[in-house]
Image (tube, rainbow, N blue to C red):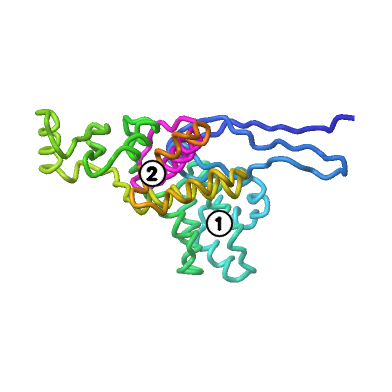
Amino acid sequence: MPMAREVEIMEMECPFCGHKEFLKTKDEANNENGFCEGEFRDAWDCTSCGERIELELDYFVKEAKEFKYYTDNNDWEGLLRFCLSEEYDDLTLIFLAKYYLKKQEWEKAQKIAEVILKINPEDFDGEIIIKRIERKDRKIRINVTASQLIDAFQCCNLKKFYFLDLRTKELVSYTFDLDGVGEEQIKKDIEDNPQSFLKIPLKNSRENFHLQESFVHEIGEHQGQTKIAEVLSMTLKKNAVFRSFTETLLKYPKINEQWFKFERDVYKEIALDWVCENNLICRWEK
């Protein structure tokens, strides 16, 4: 008899940047022993701006009915007194603040965070909530796709520099050994208006080396390609390590394809972190 399978798909909308996408939140079935197995998601990391959105917040709202009485009436002093006089459940109160973040009720979320910090000035979650609210109106939507941004992170080096022009919201670049008049003008513009440009950070040789080490470990330990991993590991001990690594990979086309995907995925994460750190929003393709 086939097992009953429950699949749930929701359309998510980020309250911070408005990005929408469909997300599979549940895919579960009972196994032959009667135990539930499968996938269940309780949070969503917005693929546009990087904000984390909790999905099961309604449950915590029911648990927080006493807290919600005061928030519904905007009685923040009363909420503080209640928390100080009763058994204080900081986790429930934090999730109530996140519930209001999800509903874009920014003032209530901030007031709850302020109450949390009055009770415990060192509460990290309270500080994070306030910082998220402070930067919600300062995010910059850029005219750059995720693929273009990842390309820039991968290609920038000591001879080619990439910048985000905050005025046009587009990427610009110039080479160190300038030949074109257009590039010379870009370089001068960046030097004259440094506050208008964000530089794509350069990758250094140590980071590249660690990336190659991680890939060798991945195919050796997790994919069982021990012989190829040993060959690649030997290239990392040579003097011309990067050229040797690249030339060796060319002998193994399928492993070479895996390397390109592995490297691309790593730079995707680096680019996403950079986007979040600088309060940017780009078109983040799947």
> In the rendered view, does 82 fall on the left or right side of 114?
right
Q: Which mark is residue 244?
A: 2
List the residue tagged with mark 1. 94
Q: Residues within 10 Å of mark 1 (few under 14, many from 20)?
A: some
Could you say whether the residue bearing mark 1 is in a helix, strand or loop?
helix
Q: Residue at x 46, y 54 (%)?
A: 129
Q: Position of residue 70 (x, y in %)?
A: 57, 56
Q: Position of residue 23 (x, y in %)?
A: 59, 33
Residue furthest to the bottom in view is 85
**Residue 240 shown in magenta:** no
Residue 184: name its quadrant.
top left
Which of the marked residues, 1 or 2, is nearer the chain's N terminus? 1
> In the rendered view, does 38 fall on the left or right side of 121?
right
Secondary structure mainly formed by the magenta segment: helix
Q: Which mark is residue 177?
A: none
Task: Please state which of residues 112 and 178 is positioned toward the viewer in this rendering.
Answer: 178
Kind of residue at disc 1: Ile
Q: Residue at x 44, y 37 (%)?
A: 264
Q: Residue at x 12, y 43 (%)?
A: 191
Q: Magenta segment, which residues?
A: 257-286
Task: Please state which of residues 62 and 277 is positioned toward the viewer in this rendering.
Answer: 277
Callout in the foreground (1, 2): 2
Residue 271: name its quadrant.
top left
Q: Position of residue 85 (x, y in %)?
A: 60, 71
